[in-house]
Amino acid sequence: MDPIQATHVEGITQTGGVVEAGGPTTDFEVSLESLNQRQLAWRRFKRNRLALIGSSIFLFMVAVAILGPVLLPYDRLDITAVKKPGGNPPSLESIKTIFGTDNLGRSVLVLTVNGARLSMLIGVMTTIIAVSIGVTIGGIAGFFGGWADGVLMRLVDLVLAVPFLFIVLVAARFFGGGDPIIIILIFGLLAWPGLARLVRAMFLSLREQDFVLAARAVGVSNSRIIFKHMLPNAIGPIVVSASLLVAGTIVLEAFVSFLNFGVRATDVSWGNALSNSQGTLVQGNWWWAFFPGMAIALTVIAINFMGDGMRDALDPYSRGR
Amino acid sequence: MACATPSIHTVAGGERVTDTIARPEARAGHTAGPLLDVRDLQVHFHVMDGTVKAVDGVSFSINPGETLGIVGESGCGKSVTALTIMRLLSSPPAEIVDGSEVIFQGRNLLALDDESMRKVRGNDIAMVFQEPMTSLNPVLTIGDQIAEAIQLHLAFSKREAWNKAIESIRQVGINNPERRVKQYPHEMSGGMRQRVMIAMALSCDPDLIIADEPTTALDVTIQAQILDLIRKVQDETGAALMLITHDLGVVAETVHDVVVMYAGRVVERGTVDEVLLAPKHPYTEGLLESTPSKGKRGQRLNVIKGTVANPFNLSPGCNFTPRCPYAFEPCPVHDPRIEDANPPDVACWLYSRAPGQPPPQRQRPILPPLEANR
Amino acid sequence: MGKYFIRRLLGLIPLFIAVVVISFFLMQFAPGGPEQAMKESKKLTNAQIERWLNAWCLEGEDSIVATAKEFGGWAGILNCNNDGWNAFFSEQGGLNFLPRTLGGGDNGILHGDFGRSIANGREVLGIITERLPATLLLAGAALFVWVSLALVIGVIAAVRQYGKFDQASTFLAYIFYSLPTFWLGLMLIFFFAVYLHWLPTSGMVNAREWPPFGTPDFGVAVGKDPLGAIKEIGTHMVLPLITLVAVNIAGDSRFVRASMLDVLNQDYVRTAKAKGAAPRRVYGRHALRNALLPVVTNVGLELPFLVAGAIVTETIFVWPGMGSLFIQSLRESDYFVLMAVIMITSAMILFANLIADLVYGIVDPRIRY
């Protein structure tokens, strides 16, 4: 039986006895509430406290990304006088000095709030590209097997032979030019192999399941089998991996831009808000490095909580609970 | 899933007999009392959706050297009973309710501390599980695993334990034991693994063997071999055997006494002749009726209608009522308990006097004559 | 077992070739290319430049054949002094890729010639041998600490599932797993080095008192004061080590916990208990040995992340290893150093994966080829 096609799972909510056809009467009331898989998963997700906390934090960050630059726009020339080398410490004089300033006098709060947009955008767009390519290639390899699988997996092995960070940094440095769009492309084009491997493994095992055999026996076309039967069953781990990829990309962008290989200085991202902050850090000026980094950490924590909550909601037997 | 037909046949003269096994004569040195005496065992499971009374007041006893068969459907609590005797359940979510007693050789196992219980396990009471494919550790040789059991309880050196392991393997009928003892579980078939499990259970010469559905996961032909082996082993060692199964054919050929369980309770007990040839409880009758046999060829197979009750909310009254073809007024209201019956061998208002009812007639429902089983 | 090893080793060869090719092409696509960079270098003598342009077939048009020749020369397969098919043979007459003593040539990677640093003129191989030990020390220590702690934490959490330790370690694991490594490093530096002054802020040894690690001078200095050297390196290693392992411990302890829980639910654990085995024996001999199997595989898969972590950590802490060498040469566009670092590191990871596979083959008796 196709586990997704048979989407109605009996959730017995009313206590009762036994349903009978004919025979002596029973006096028990029975009611059956029918929930489909998605509703069941949502229910489980809602019960997970950490997942809810994560979701709230994440939504907060999204709100900051959208509204922040509107309320506190970044202006290169908006500079507070720097009273000591390395920037001003946090003070309560005005909103803009709450997080202190960097060594040029720019408000760390403004930098943090504005950086959210670009960093999260890079995270999401990279993931979209990586997932699209990865699912396609992994799906083809896993479903068709044979020589297609062989060729595509050799390709994946090739890209994965050299450690990811090496290639990313080299590509960003030499081909990036500081342009966020190119950065997105570079990240996306290098991140898909991991997902392809995952999708391929899942499709390979799904392919052997009886419901696929049954669909084939009835004459369902290949593409319909892939999209309507197999993909919905594989969607769980893919969604979880995608969420982790968003988090990982945000951190990656931060490091690459921190090294000045990533987003150019005229744009603001969390990464380049942090660049050059190490020098003043060792002189005791902690705020410049702390606040944007904290924003990154909070976002990633939030995404990880959500991702774990999603994993448990979609497959409650996955982690020995 | 094939059931072996119970070997019940009609001999000349119209009497029904079974191929039962003979009871052991009282052996010198055994105390007169029962080896295992379970009294009013109650085990509750506390889970997210509520509390399940997996075992709800079960009592039975086994004498030294005898065999007891515990029969019932999946979910009736027979495995939980066995695991409770061995104290292998984890304490949340399981709860052994106060008042339950498991007296083995004079001691209440439920009151023992962990270390004393460990000395009992494998040594005085050994258990054989249902799934031979997964019950052996895949990264250790079977020799290691059998020798481990030996070394845990008997003061043997490693070499002595290893030799005894080889002997046990030979005893359970595996050829070439010297070679086999160094093999890993994945190199053996299911039937062979089950033999290894039995060898492991025997290795410390236990007084009681608990076998939980030992043949369910095996092919029918292997089932017969394993049952023969269990019987032979019992004869040779004089151990008592508690055999748990849902398969009446197994019961007929292997046990002296039978306890029938339903929804966590004992509903009927007796010798194997009494229970299989003259079943009293409608459930037992239903089980026997639904066994396919040669004589019923071409007829519609009988079933016990309905399904097992929802364990979270058992109704008042007899648990079997919705499925019972003989249910009448007292059944949905009053709960018949086997301890209250006189004699305490069946829990049913057909045989006991229910409150407000006239005395029962104490006749068992008419069972259509079985065809001869040739 | 031996057959398994040989087969895996052979399987690595195509991957290794891929690594070499990729390293080469990364350089090719860089703006200007190596010829340009060499010519503009202030540190290379004209003689050196001439030698390499020749040895690496770099004087040529931009065509596919020319690029292939460049690869051949750089790798040491081709002898660029000869034309046509003779290019495969060295001056002495033997196949060029063979070692000199067997009649081969002396150019290219196969003969140990990785070029010179464009930034400081030194031989690349020498730079790498100087920097490699520092990374091996840090990464080796990290591997040990990370695996041990992850095992201990994961097993305890699994055995006492849902207990206080489990809940606390799960929560902390989530937090630490999510922290960006470089930010964690910065914060640690601030708190322990700058604010508390307990530990040094960066470097491997105090540069004012010790020669750089990896140089022969350092070896001499260690000989004179071994305890001092250990103390010096030790205090400098604390913060980088914590930074490097924090994320990995967090992630892997969860993985160990999950694996252990899986195993604890298996039938054979119940059998062990039924035999009367004490809990320690059940957990150690039966459960842990089985739970380790996926963990071994996982560690193997995570080695590239260890490398990435090393790059980050070494950069933040100015630890004189391969990671910081990589970043440094990236900044300075020091192509030949870059290529060598990438190639050697990737090769080491491939080899480490092989070792991990072997270990798995030893531990799991079901895998026997």
Image (spheres, grey):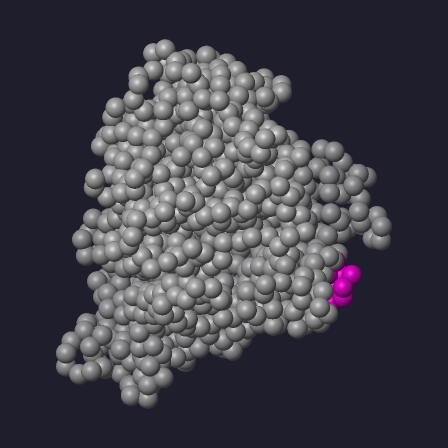
Q: Residue at x 25, y 26 (%)?
A: B107
Q: Identify the image quadrant of residue B63.
A: top left
- Which residue is outermost to the bottom? A70
Q: Identify the image quadrant of residue C96.
A: top right
Q: Identify the image quadrant of residue A251.
A: bottom left
Q: Residue at x 67, y 61 (%)?
A: A213
Query: Toward the viewer: C79 or B259?
Result: B259
Residue B294 in percent (x, y) is at 65, 42
Left or right side of C146 for A245? right
Q: Give the quarter of the figure containing the C terminus of chain C.
A: top right
Residue C336 visible in the snapshot? no
- Which residue is outermost to the left? A92
Left or right side of B330 for B195? right
Image vertical order of residue C280 relative to residue A240, above or below? above
Image vertical order of residue A17 relative to residue B257, above or below? below
Residue A288 lies in the magenta stretch: no
Residue C80 in percent (x, y) is at 76, 51
Q: Residue at x 58, y 34 (%)?
A: B14
Q: How many marks?
A: 0
Find the magenta span and give its range.
Answer: C61-68
- Which residue is outermost to the right? C85
Q: Give the quarter of the figure containing the N terminus of chain C.
A: top right
Predominant SS of the magenta segment: helix
Q: Residue at x 62, y 62 (%)?
A: A211
Query: Toward the viewer: A158 or B144?
Result: B144
Residue A132 in percent (x, y) is at 57, 72
Residue A139 visible in the snapshot? yes
Left or right side of B48 for C286? right
Residue A104 in percent (x, y) is at 29, 76
Query: Toward the viewer: C185 or C279?
Result: C279
Query: Toward the viewer: A239 or C129?
Result: A239
Image vertical order of residue B294 relative to residue B165, above or below? below
